[in-house]
Amino acid sequence: MTDTWTGQDPEGAAGTRTGRTRGVRGRPAGPGRRRTLLVVAAVVVVAVVAGAGAFGLDLGGDDEAATGPGRAGSVVEVARRTLVDQTAVDGKLGYGKEVPVPLKATGTVTWLPERGDRVSRGETLLKVDDRPVVLLYGALPMYRALGPGGTDSAGSASAGSDADGADAEGSGSEGSGDGKAGSGSGAGAEEGTKGMDVRQFESNLAALGYTDFTVDDEYTAKTAEAVKRWQRHLGVPRTGRITVGDVVYASGRIRVGDVGARIGAEATPEALSYTGGARRVTVDASAEDGAWATRGTEVTVELPGADPVDGKVSSVGRRMTAAEGDGGGEGGGAGQGPATFPVTITLDDPGALGRMESAPVTVRYVRERRAGVLSVPVSALVALAEGGHGLELAEPEGRFVAVRTGLFANGMVEVRGAGLREGLKVRIPE
């Protein structure tokens, strides 16, 4: 849905005419014929403007623009204004798409959160075998165990260790002694000690207040000592190592979505889903008219029963989705409408929404802005017999100035031409 009308710039002759407009074949028009032509032309212009309104073309603008023309036959001044051409699209307020928690822990689910719960860094998402799975912040997934040595890419001995951090006899959480769960045999000892995932983990550990080590790409003995202090706080064996199932990474604070597991069931990736913790607006932008959807674009979000809220485009999806259609043949057909792509908008002040969590919204963005241009109400335009548009001067009566039009917005139109100046009084034709 759009509510704009972009003005054309006809090649009307600039200058001042003194009561004589030329007919179609170039004959001078008499007074009666001239008035008839002007009245008809004015009716045509008014009809075009009315037709634009009938098709939902709301000519949006900002506070500096006039609210609209005066009564028919009134006198207005050519004014210098800022005209803003806005477009409106439909959107939806919510928390974004739910995605599964990338759970790697194996075992029996012993505790679950509730839908709508917020979870921040260092807090427990769920418990598996009565061990907390902790949320941390980062872009890299947890794909291997981490430790100062004796840790392979499949796991560690954290689930089967004594309170001092020594490996329990027979190895790790599975208790199989096959070396896959961190037997302490030293297999793959260097694989879990260096890398960007180590830096990401150490950054989180430091943010939680466990320091006395250097945040870098290497998991050292000092890192292990800090981990032991953290594990003591969590109430788990103090091994100084992190297994692949101990933590889950997300980009920030999350909101629990669908709880697909039950206590006593086996832990699976479908156990929980989540969304971002902050409310946002999503728009399915049309591929045909989506040039506005670039990161950082400023928008205004209008919500039902609330004041407009400013926001910015925070992300733009790259995947196009065809519009759904009725289809024609067996098994349905392709979509009939234009393809769309997802656009996410973050709000500058989410607190202004109160407790509203989901609602249909209108998103307005600026297509074009013209600052400090001469403008008049659209209804002041007169279609000249020789082509183009003109304005009827208030004094002397019956005198016209040819103009070129620019941007149309909020019932106003940008005008240019010889003889135009700020404060010039023109008449809106009856």
Image (cartoon, helix red, strand yellow):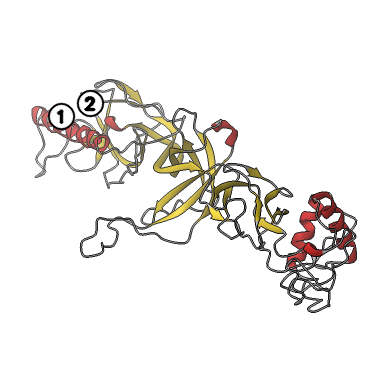
Query: Left or right: where does residue 47 sit relative to residue 121?
Result: left
Q: Is residue 328 above or below residue 374?
A: below
Expressed as whole percent of the image width and height from the top left, the position of residue 17 reads 24, 34
Q: Residue 39 bears which disc, if any?
A: 1
- Of callouts 1 and 2, which one flags the residue occurring earlier in the amino acid sequence? 1
Which amino acid is tagged 2? Answer: Pro
Q: Residues within 10 Å of mark 1 (few under 14, many from 20)?
A: some
Query: Left or right: where does residue 259 sit relative to residue 192?
Result: left
Q: Is residue 175 above or below residue 321?
A: below
Q: Secondary structure at mark 2?
A: loop
Q: Residue 429 bears which disc, if any?
A: 2
Query: Quadrant where the C terminus lies?
Result: top left
- Residue at 32% x, 43% y is 7
Q: Nearer the viewer, residue 428 or 224?
A: 224
Q: Residues within 10 Å of mark 2 (few under 14, many from 20)?
A: many
Asked if marks 1 and 2 touch (Cβ < 8 Å), the reply is: yes
